[in-house]
Amino acid sequence: MTQISLMDDLAEILVSEEALAERIAELGEEITNHYLGKDIEEIVVVAVTNGSIVFVADLMRKLKLHARLDCIRVSSYRDDTQPVSEPEIIDNIRLNIAGEHVLLIDDILDTGSTLQKLVSVLRAMKPASLRTCILLDKEGRRTKTYRASYSGFTIPEAFVVGYGLDFAERYRNLPCIGVLRPELQNPPEWC
Ligand code: IMP
Ligand code: MG
């Protein structure tokens, strides 16, 4: 049987499995304390699929709150490493979030367009509160002035994969976050 090591496709590991687990436990506590401190015992988690599913699965289990889950799907990246269009909602949430406390979770804040768009769409649904949580922040590439309420790690301007983040739908199942080897990217010059 052939053995495949996905790790061999990485030029560098940026965030290890252990560092992810540790930071996610901290975020879970921080988020729990925020809501309980305001006497809020139930929230609605909105996961931006597909990229945030691994992060959301782990983070949700660190929340000591009642949490309902819904997903929203956005397209802006095609099968390469650069955005090719403005973010577009291709599958909206099903829950009625009017009057609810919503926590929107995405994998990475890059230019900021995706989160900015989603925040305006969800705000229009009149939640009682809306906070945002991202695992990774590529601050250097921001074109919109946007800050998430919670952020896991600030990373440099490289195209990263793993722990939910993909390149052409691949590498989401890597347990850590790393930089994809440039020759495996398309276009290879952006790395
Ligand atoms: P933004 O709209 O430019 O902030 O981009 C956010 C979205 O782009 C994320 O939800 C990711 O799906 C995708 N993205 C941005 N940078 C990366 C990366 O380095 N690897 C994988 N996906 C990325
Ligand atoms: Mg994404």
Image (cartoon, rainbow, N blue to C red):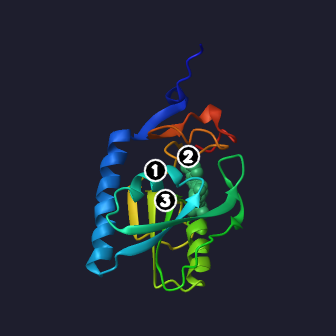
Please name whichever residue, 35 or 151, is drawn nearer the observer in this view of the structure.
35
Does residue 74 lie above or below 20 as drawn? Answer: below
Label 3 vs 1, first from the N-terminus: 3
Q: Amino acid at mark 1?
A: Pro
Residue pictured at 63% horizontal, 43% vertical: 167
Q: What residue is shown with label 3?
A: 140
Residue 33: x, y in percent?
27, 70
Structural distance between the alpha carbons of marks 3 and 1 = 7 Å
Does residue 1 lie above or below 31 as drawn? Answer: above
Residue pictured at 50% horizontal, 32% vertical: 11
Does residue 63 lie above or below 158 as drawn? Answer: below
Structural distance between the alpha carbons of marks 3 and 2 = 13 Å
SS at badge 1: loop
Residue 70: which quarter of the image?
A: bottom right
Residue 191: x, y in percent?
58, 43
Residue 105: x, y in percent?
49, 63
Please name whichever residue, 173 or 136, is drawn nearer the observer in this view of the structure.
173
Please name whichever residue, 166 or 41, is drawn nearer the observer in this view of the structure.
41
Q: What residue is shown with label 1?
A: 156
Residue pictured at 30% horizontal, 81% vertical: 38
Is label 2's Cβ within 8 Å of ligand 1?
yes
- Asked if the residue at tag 1 contacts the one at tag 3, i.e. Cβ–Cβ closer than 8 Å, the answer is yes
Is label 3's Cβ within 8 Å of ligand 1?
no
Q: What residue is shown with label 2?
A: 159
Q: Amino acid at mark 3?
A: Gly
SS at badge 3: helix
Please name whichever residue, 36 or 189, is drawn nearer the observer in this view of the structure.
36
